[in-house]
Amino acid sequence: MEKIAIIGAGLIGCAWASVFARAGHAVALYDINADALAGARDAIEAGLVKLHGLGLITEQPDTVLGRVSVTSSLEEAMLGADLVQENVRETVDAKKEIYALLDRLAGPDTLLASSTSGIPASSFTADLAGRHRCFVGHPINPPSVVPLVELVPAPWTDPAVIERARAIYARAGQVPIVVQREIQGFIVNRLQGALLAEAFRLVEDGYVSSGDIDKAVKDGLGLRWAFMGPMETIDLNAPGGIRDYCGRYGPLYLDIAKQATPREWNDALIGKLEQERLAELPAQQRPARQAWRDQRLMQLVAHKRDASSE
């Protein structure tokens, strides 16, 4: 199995360590922050215990955890690594700084992936000698539960690198999608952004409350989207398939799109949404709700896996 180096031991880094370790990889988890490293193994183990309890992993958590080593030496973490998953601060300068080091320390065939949520790889790899092996591997939070990962090449990324990466992530139980060329925000954020823009507009214009927006998705659209995407949804929603659906509803959606001029999320609207959310969930209860979210996601993943085997 390939060795995986994880750069950054925060929430995303620890989640990636869990993903690769439970797939059988040796994982070296690096962070310059001693406090982050000190709590990393406990955080990973806690997640593994939950996954094991739901049957999402069959190995004992301590066996999986045994594949994870932690180190404050970047050189040690990089030694012999086949794939590096970087998770440092979301700034171009921070990415440039760490990638200069990664490119210098990595072996000639080592793949260098960034977990960045929206910074294109071209903005921090242009001057690297090994820029051909750099790309974005953007996870959906938390990647230890949600399997999707977006593979986004820079203009100079070797297509063979993306194919190698796709195979590694897939073998680790992730669901990689390949973005064929760079675009701001990648795919998932753009889809989420389109929904948020319309949701914010409907609340701001007084058509609906934020609470009912959430119900429209979690008790409506989201039930279908949990096991099929929007293209399959509309293909099944008209007797003649996707062409029939587009003929029936295309004009309606065109009219809606023409009404949807871009708007800034102004402070008054944000304040309204904040107050509505705090009424639903006081700030001090947010950590417990986040833990509840992760547990429900695990249960949903377990259900989908069981259903797919029927």
Image: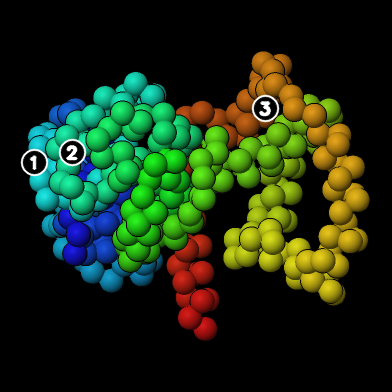
Q: Determine whether 237 is above or below 36 in the image.
A: below
Q: Residue at x 71, y 55 (%)?
A: 221
Q: Nearer the viewer, mark 2 or mark 3?
A: 2
Q: Is residue 74 left or right of residue 57?
A: left
Which residue position holds label 3? 273
Q: Residue at x 82, y 66 (%)?
A: 243
Asked if labels 2 and 1 touch by Cβ distance under 8 angstroms, the answer is yes
Going by the numbered disc 2, the residue's amino acid type is: Tyr
The numbered disc on residue 30 is 2
Mark 1 or mark 2, earlier in chain? 2
Dot 2: element: strand
The answer for how far apart the CA atoms under marks 3 and 1 are is: 46 Å
Q: Residue at x 40, y 36 (%)?
A: 121
Dot 3: element: helix
Percent x, y for residue 175?
44, 60
Dot 1: element: helix
Q: Is residue 50 left or right of residue 102?
A: right
Going by the numbered disc 1, the residue's amino acid type is: Glu
The numbered disc on residue 76 is 1
